[in-house]
Amino acid sequence: MAVLPIRKFPDPVLREKTLPVEKIDDELHKLIKNMADTMYAAPGVGLAANQVGILKSVVVVDIDEGLMVFLNPEITWYGNETEEGEEGCLSVYPQEIQVMIPRSTKIRFKAKNEKGEPVEFEAEGLLARALQHEVDHIHGILILDRTSPEERRRALKDLAGKTLV
Ligand code: ZN
């Protein structure tokens, strides 16, 4: 068990695109285990590998329905309906900074599980939101990029205030 340090905004690694996982080996299993430990310790509902400084397309998610592990995740379809919802991020510290983000309420999601088996499913609600958030991470996109200019200004101001303390 190892809880890894979570990279915080504006760490440039959060802006990097991750690389697809090609080999499933002990090193990858160790990374997955450590990412899960880190997410639960935070606590958070999701974590992408670049948030712990590893440029691999690996995400872990748990929306209180058990641990889900996805390799090379992609969203293959976005529903037309979007909904605004409050989101925080373990890398946009402190966590009490939440911004309103519009997300599709329904998506189609494709990835591999930790055994390398393909998985594909439709997700909605909180799971759809969490998966969109994590897939954003592996493309170097943060919640600050998705929110309105007013919300971004407010969040950055809050962040600056908190860091000065
Ligand atoms: Zn995040």
Image (cartoon, helix red, strand yellow):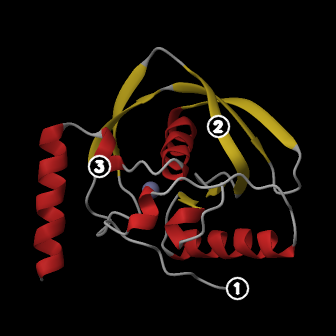
Can you identify the residue that label 3 sits on?
A: 144
Can you identify the residue that label 2 sits on?
A: 74
Name the amino acid, label 2.
Answer: Glu
Q: Which mark is residue 1?
A: 1
Name the amino acid, label 1.
Answer: Met
Does the beta carbon at disc 3 come under 8 Å from ligand 1?
no
**Sequence-wise first label, 2 or 3:** 2
Q: Position of residue 26 (x, y in %)?
A: 86, 75
Q: CA distance from mark 2 to mark 3?
A: 21 Å
Does the beta carbon at disc 1 come under 8 Å from ligand 1?
no
Horizontal arrangement in the rendering, residue 140 relative to residue 1 (left or right): left
Which residue, as the protein is rendered here, is positioned at the far top? 80
User: Which residue occupies the foreground of this view, 130 or 138?
Assistant: 138
Q: Position of residue 96 (x, y in %)?
A: 27, 63
Q: Circle 3 sits in a helix, a strand or a loop, which is it?
A: helix
The quadrant of the image that shows the N terminus is bottom right
**Sequence-wise first label, 2 or 1:** 1
Residue at (72% x, 68% y) in the render? 32
Q: Position of residue 55 (x, y in %)?
A: 60, 63
Contact, mark 2 vs mark 1 (Cβ under 8 Å): no
Ligand 1, by image quadrant, is: bottom left
User: Which residue occupies the foreground of this view, 115 or 42?
Assistant: 115
Of discs 1 and 3, which sits in the foreground? Answer: 3
Q: CA distance from mark 1 to mark 3?
A: 31 Å
Q: Quadrant of residue 50?
A: bottom right
